[in-house]
Image (tube, grey):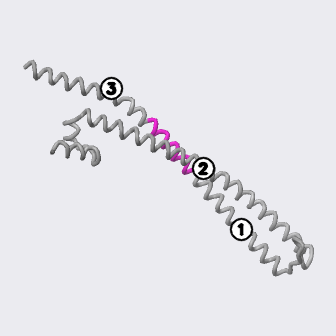
């Protein structure tokens, strides 16, 4: 019962130093499974970041177009208003106050679009950094994982050598 409890603890709760020494092959097997799962999770996360960046880049392009249109619209409204006391835009007559308000609203939109573009740029830079970190971690984990079968066999040899030495003594 005690041994079963120790196995359950190692499987779900982690491995103590004592448990590692008592069952080194079991620990290496656990480490292989854990690394394999961690690598899969890291790869999924990296793929998710790539997808999110792609979506964000599309949105950034859309916002960039809106920013350009807002700049053009504000300029057009200013020009029309400066040309006359009233502006005829989009088939309607606008008074000075209405044009002023429209320009103010368009400039606010422009400012919001510019802020969004800055946030997109910052988020993209952070995501790219994290993607690089994940790539390094995946590479290191895969290298560690490839070494574990050798370590497991070495431990088995040591165990067998110890058992053989006990039998011969």
Where's residue 134, x and y in %?
48, 43
Please name the residue shown 16% across and 24% down the image: 162
Q: Quick one: 14 or 129, which is closer to the camera?
A: 14
Q: Please give the residue where the numbered disc 1 appears in the rendered image.
A: 109
When asked about the image quadrant of residue 118, the answer is bottom right
Where's residue 115, x and y in %?
65, 62
Q: Please give the residue where the numbered disc 3 appears in the rendered image.
A: 150
SS of the residue at dot 2? Answer: helix
Q: Please give the residue where the numbered disc 2 appears in the rendered image.
A: 53
User: Label 2: few (<14), some or many (≥20) within 10 Å?
Assistant: some
Q: CB of mark 2 within 8 Å of CB of mark 1?
A: no
| Dot placed on the residue nearer the N-terminal end, 2 or 3 | 2
Query: Magenta: predominant secondary structure element?
Result: helix
Q: Is residue 141 magenta?
A: no
SS of the residue at dot 3? Answer: helix
Where's residue 26, x and y in %?
26, 35
The residue segment tinted magenta is 124-139
Q: Is residue 72 left or right of residue 32?
A: right
When asked about the image quadrant of residue 17, the answer is top left
| Dot placed on the residue nearer the N-terminal end, 2 or 1 | 2
Q: Is residue 125 left or right of residue 93?
A: left
Where's residue 69, x and y in %?
78, 62
């Amino acid at each position: 019962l005690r041994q079963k409890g120790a196995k359950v603890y190692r499987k779900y709760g982690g491995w103590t130093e004592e448990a590692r020494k008592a069952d080194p092959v079991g620990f290496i097997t656990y480490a292989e499974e854990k690394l394999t799962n961690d690598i899969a999770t890291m790869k999924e996360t990296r793929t998710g970041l790539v997808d999110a960046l792609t979506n964000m880049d599309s949105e950034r392009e859309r916002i960039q177009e809106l920013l350009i249109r807002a700049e053009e619209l504000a300029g057009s409204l200013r020009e029309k208003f400066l040309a006359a006391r009233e502006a005829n835009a989009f088939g309607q007559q606008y008074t000075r106050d209405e044009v002023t308000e429209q320009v103010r609203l368009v400039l606010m939109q422009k400012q919001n679009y510019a802020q969004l573009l800055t946030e997109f740029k910052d988020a993209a830079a952070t995501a790219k950094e994290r993607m690089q970190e994940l790539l390094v971690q995946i590479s290191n984990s895969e290298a560690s994982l490839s070494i574990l079968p050798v370590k497991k066999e070495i431990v088995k040899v040591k165990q067998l050598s110890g058992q053989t030495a006990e039998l011969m003594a």
